[in-house]
Amino acid sequence: MNRIQHFLHAKTQFNLHSPFVYGLYTEVLFSRAPGAPRGRYESTVWRLEQRYGIQAQRLDGSATLHAPEADFLVVNHPHRDEARWQGIVENPRYQATIDLFSVGIAVTNPHLSKQHFILR
């Protein structure tokens, strides 16, 4: 998927019907956070670390975080390896996957139903 296709399919917080993903979107992904590092991937991992008070385990362009309410896999540039990203999206282990184009987030939370979100 290229950036234009992503933009045409992407939704904003106004189209989210999942309270968990809406909260993640508004409180973590797009909140103003003084001190956040530059770069979408680094900023996303940092914001999750700050929100849940945990340290991410980083390897191979991805990071995992084990928070009390959910586990997160954050992937840097998921569309560089489209087959890997599709494998993550289709994996039944992850109930929610969020595609921000330059960052992909997979969430393990047994209280969520399987959904894939394409967000701006």
Image (spheres, helix red, strand yellow):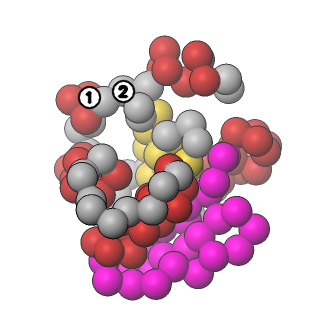
Task: Judge whether residue 105 can be spotted in this image.
Answer: no
Residue 119: x and y in percent read: 41, 34
Answer with left or right where residue 22 lies relative to residue 41: left
Q: Which mark is residue 11?
A: 2
Q: Is residue 63 magenta?
A: yes
- Residue range in magenta is 52-78
State the separation of the CA atoms marked 1 and 2. 6 Å
Residue 119 placement, left or right of 81: left
Q: Is residue 85 magenta?
A: no
Query: Residue 54, percent across and down?
Result: 39, 84
The residue drawn where x is 52% and y is 41% is 99
Q: Are marks 1 and 2 in contact (CB under 8 Å)?
A: yes
Element type where label 1 sits in the image? helix
Crowdedness of circle 1 by 10 Å Cα count: few (<14), some, many (20+)? few
Q: Say if residue 77 shows up in the picture.
A: yes
- Position of the N terminus by quadrant: top right
* Mark 2 crowd level (few <14, some 14–19, many ≥20, 10 Å Cα): some
Residue 63 percent location from the top left of the image? 59, 70
Question: Which of the 4 image quarters holds residue 58?
Answer: bottom right
Residue type of the residue flagged with mark 2: Lys
What number is the disc on residue 15? 1
